């Protein structure tokens, strides 16, 4: 009997540890667009830089939150994009690169052409795309799990399609009840 209780306790503990270690299933933009062709979902893109403190906080505090991880993995394709990296990206019939990238530079580097095309002006920025890969909205700045939840659900539920005025947006935010912990 003690052996059965011990085995159950070990199973419960290991399941708990596994849940805490759950991670967002990050992919490239090309992989996300390919996946959309098979199973349409919206895309959430984390636009970051290697030197950005708030970007690192977003990774540590928000993108490791179990509620965020679960919701993003179930409802979105998640893309990580270094806005100052040198990876060549094919998107919507165009090839984007970073011809001014300098591998010897520490800290800030030249902006990637895709970041420019998406009109990214701050880091981090989370860009949401619809099921056709069309940009819905870039959301600049660090977001807590609850703050990100508002946008995740806004776009997943297509609530953004019913908001056309500042007053409607203010009311949406006021009425939103966060369910994520942390």
Image: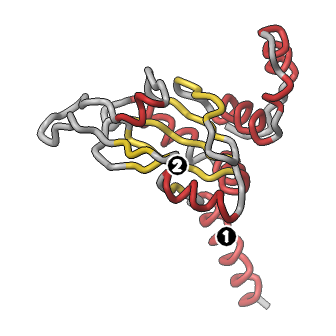
Q: Are marks 2 and 1 in contact (CB under 8 Å)?
A: no
- Identify the image quadrant of the N terminus: bottom right
Question: In the image, which is nearer the foreground, mark 2 or mark 1?
Answer: 2
Query: Which type of secondary structure does the marked residue at label 2 adopt?
Result: strand
Seen in the image, is 30 located left or right of residue 154?
A: left
Marks 2 and 1, how far apart at CA: 27 Å
Q: Residues within 10 Å of mark 2 (few under 14, many from 20)?
A: many
Seen in the image, is 168 located left or right of residue 67?
A: right
Q: Report how many numbered discs are placed on residues in the image.
A: 2
Q: Quadrant of residue 108?
A: top left
Which residue is denoted by mark 2 in the rendering? 79
Determine the residue positioned at 41% across, 28% down.
Answer: 116
Q: Residues within 10 Å of mark 1 (few under 14, many from 20)?
A: few
Q: Nearer the viewer, residue 151 or 20?
A: 151
Which residue is denoted by mark 1 in the rendering? 15
Please state the horizontal and vertical placement of residue 23, each as a whole percent of the image: 56, 57
- Identify the image quadrant of the C terminus: top right
Please state the horizontal and vertical placement of residue 178, each as a whole percent of the image: 79, 32
> Which residue is the extreme one toward the front?
93
Q: Earlier in the sequence, mark 2 or mark 1?
A: 1
Q: Quadrant of residue 84?
A: top left
On screen, 5 above or below 125? below
Please state the horizontal and vertical placement of residue 17, each as a whole percent of the image: 60, 64
Q: Nearer the viewer, residue 156 or 182?
A: 156
Seen in the image, is 150 located left or right of residue 77?
A: right
Determine the residue positioned at 70% across, 32% down.
Answer: 151
On screen, 41 above or below 137? below
> Which residue is the extreme one toward the left?
104
């Amino acid at each position: 009997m003690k052996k059965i209780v011990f085995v159950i306790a070990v199973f419960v503990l290991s399941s708990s540890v596994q849940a805490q270690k759950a991670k967002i299933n990050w992919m490239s933009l090309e992989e996300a667009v390919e996946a959309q062709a098979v199973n349409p979902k919206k895309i959430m893109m984390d636009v970051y830089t290697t030197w950005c403190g708030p970007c690192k906080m977003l990774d540590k505090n928000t993108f490791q939150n179990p509620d965020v991880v679960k919701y993003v993995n179930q409802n979105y394709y998640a893309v990580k994009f270094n806005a100052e990296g040198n990876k060549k990206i094919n998107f919507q019939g165009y090839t984007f690169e970073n011809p001014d990238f300098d591998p010897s530079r520490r800290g800030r580097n030249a902006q990637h052409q895709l970041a420019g095309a998406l009109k990214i002006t701050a880091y981090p920025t989370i860009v949401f795309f619809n099921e056709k890969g069309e940009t819905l909205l870039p959301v600049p700045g660090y977001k807590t799990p609850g703050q990100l939840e508002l946008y995740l659900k806004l776009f997943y539920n297509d609530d953004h399609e019913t908001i056309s005025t500042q007053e409607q947006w203010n009311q949406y935010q006021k009425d939103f009840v966060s369910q994520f912990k942390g």
